[in-house]
Amino acid sequence: MIDQLPILAEINPGFWVILAGLICTLLPVGHARKAFVIAAPIFAGLLIFQLHDVTTPEVLGGVLQFGPVELTTLRIDKLSVVWGYLFCLAGVINGIYALHEKCRITDSSALIYTGAAIAGVLAGDMITLFIMWELTAISSVFLIWKGGDHAYAAGVRYLAIHVLSGVMLLAGAILHAQANGGDFMFNEIGLTSPGGWLMLLAMGIKVGFPGLHMWMQDAYPKASITGTVILASFTTKFAIYALARGFEGEPILIWIGAIMTCFPVFFAVVENDLRRVLSYSLNNQLGFMVCGIGIGGALAMNGVVGQVFVHVIFKGLLFMSIGAVMYRTGTAKASELGGLFRSMPYTAIFCLIGAGSIAAVPLFAAFVTKAMILAAAVEEHHYIAFLMMLFASAGVMEHSGIKVPHFTFFAHDSGRRVKEAPWNMLAAMSIAGFLCFYLAWPFGGYQQLYALMPFELDKPYQPYTWDHVVFQMQLLFAAIFAFTLLKRFKLYPAERRAEILDVDWTYRKMGLNVAKWGSAMWDRLAVNTKRVRTRFISSAGRRLYQTFSPAGAASEATPSGLAAIMTAGLLFVVLLLAYIAK
Amino acid sequence: MSVETDIPLETEIKTKPVDDIHPLSRKLLFLGDPKVKRNFIWLPLVGMIICIILGIFHPQKHPLPGEQYIPGSWAIYGFVAYSLIVLSASTLFKILGRDEDYYGEGGLPDPDYSTDPMITGEAHHD
């Protein structure tokens, strides 16, 4: 394909997906749009496959010159190619999942969003990265707004936060390039310059650093069913790519990542909305990746790449299963679900596969990837970070491994008797479920995943060792035992309807109240000052009139009036100044 | 401790009754049996004990300092961590739980705009 059309080697494959999305905005025929939704990511994936040359460290293309700034819009190397394939795969699975939804907005924004994410990770320079950074935000907000009126404000907040992140990224990129002789190539950034810190903060917003994370739990659960699945695939993983490219081995990321793994588990345990629980779980999983980037080195970075790859699949699977439940029952609230394995057994099985994968059960996806990050933490003597991640692993078992499937498909019977999920949802979940198994399969499965990993290891990592399997199972069995024990003694909290406050309270409630108070104070001040102002002006006018009018006091003493004297005095001062200046 | 709310439950969204249980699920109905639920506790307990014993014969190749002297170290850690997380829930709920309409962003149903059953008020059964 590239040989016959060499121009394809100069165009970022993500741009074709964006183009397909733009065409979809004008295409009234639903089936044709769906064909684009499936075909465009496949086409982009094939292009990446053809462009990627394993014998060359990196393939560059699409070089554009804008004055002194040179843009390299395409770079395919060992790191970016993994994200490129992954996003294409996620685009296809998401497209199949959304086949039932006849909506032009969803189809076109999903394609543009997917394309922007692909183009972003395959961008060689920071300006293209910035443009794609913003395009992912702008295109994806429609998926949130598709959730309906209740999602409008969350969408606006999401857009504002992401645009701010983009602006910070651009400012950081300019400062960084300025400090590096005008080089805008996106390579290692580091924290030696203010530009580096700005870029880290920008990426921190998008990846959900502690305190900057709340856009995720605010917006994702309010998006449409398919919207949440699509959103969970790209934005944060795009930011993980940027962090991996720019900030590998920065020690501060170890602690940020370790905290990121721990704090969401406490929110997830009290949350009733299962899509929100999964958003906290997403945040927690990103923490493992951030921590791995902070540790740096071949083992940890391969662990991060592997974790990103399988995470998109199993997290998508969990969101898809809860989305299917919501599609049939109309709710994703744990307090209103339960016993659905009676009606939706296939969805229940897929949810359990996703749960097993995220909990790193042997033979399931995360078992072969998360362990690399943990092993790297021990190897590099980051024991506290390791213990924090181990604590979070027990937390993962709680919220995603047990809570989500238990309260949805088991627990008490809610009495809901609904139909199984539509065929397209089941098909998408089947693909994701199969990959969760296959990518962890000990005989030729995980080896394929490891073959994609970008860094050479001195000694190949072996996930299926006795000690790894046994100790991981100790952790998981102990967590399940604790769950059953706490349930037996009625110490496990019942799911209750409530809004759980998080950091966004500071701007959604406190900030809003401060703004309202400020506005009210300003209005009152304006009313009061108006009265004082009016009184002062009328009084001053009256006094001036009494003094300077032809019949005023000044005219009585000096016929020319005080104004004439002041004018003469001023002229004298000007004359004097002119004389001195000369 | 519970948060009172006046807004209607989402269960009030109409769900058409489909009484029959899925054919595959009929074979799994024993999972809902109270006796099975009650005795399920033995499965993780036995599994955990077996893994602790296996852990003695297959110790960690790269243990934390001192970890080799604690049999079942990951089981102890997992049990304590899980229990701590769950037992903190009640206190956290008291501190962080508010009425569902606390932020006042419920929004009105907009069936022309949204495809979500939560918004359209009709669950999908076909």
Image (cartoon, coloured by chain):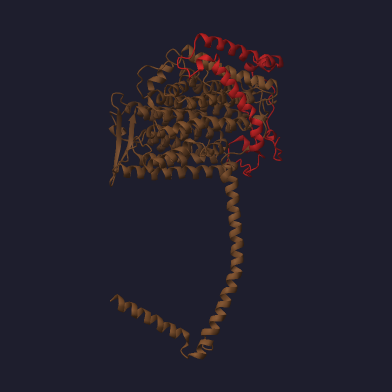
Please count the marks in the image. 0
**Position above or below: A574 against A452:** below
Chain B rendering hue: red
Q: Is residue A389 visible?
A: yes
Q: Is residue A101 visible?
A: no
The C terminus of chain A appears in which quarter of the rendering?
A: bottom left
Q: Quadrant of residue A527?
A: bottom right
**Position above or below: B33 against A310:** above
**Picture coordinates of residue B95, whole percent (x, y):** 65, 37
Q: Quadrant of residue B1?
A: top right
For this rendering, which residue is in front, A173 or A580? A580
Q: Residue at x 32, y 28 (%)?
A: A51
**Picture coordinates of residue A531, whole percent (x, y):** 61, 69
Q: Quadrant of residue A275?
A: top right
Q: Residue at x 44, y 38 (%)?
A: A203
Q: Is residue A82 left or right of residue A324?
A: left
Q: Is residue A220 left or right of residue B16?
A: left
For this rendering, which residue is in front, A458 or A319? A458
**Picture coordinates of residue A256, whole percent (x, y):** 48, 33
Chain A rendering hue: brown
The N terminus of chain A appears in which quarter of the rendering?
A: top left
**Picture coordinates of residue A545, whole percent (x, y):** 54, 83
For this rendering, which residue is in front, A50 or A412? A412
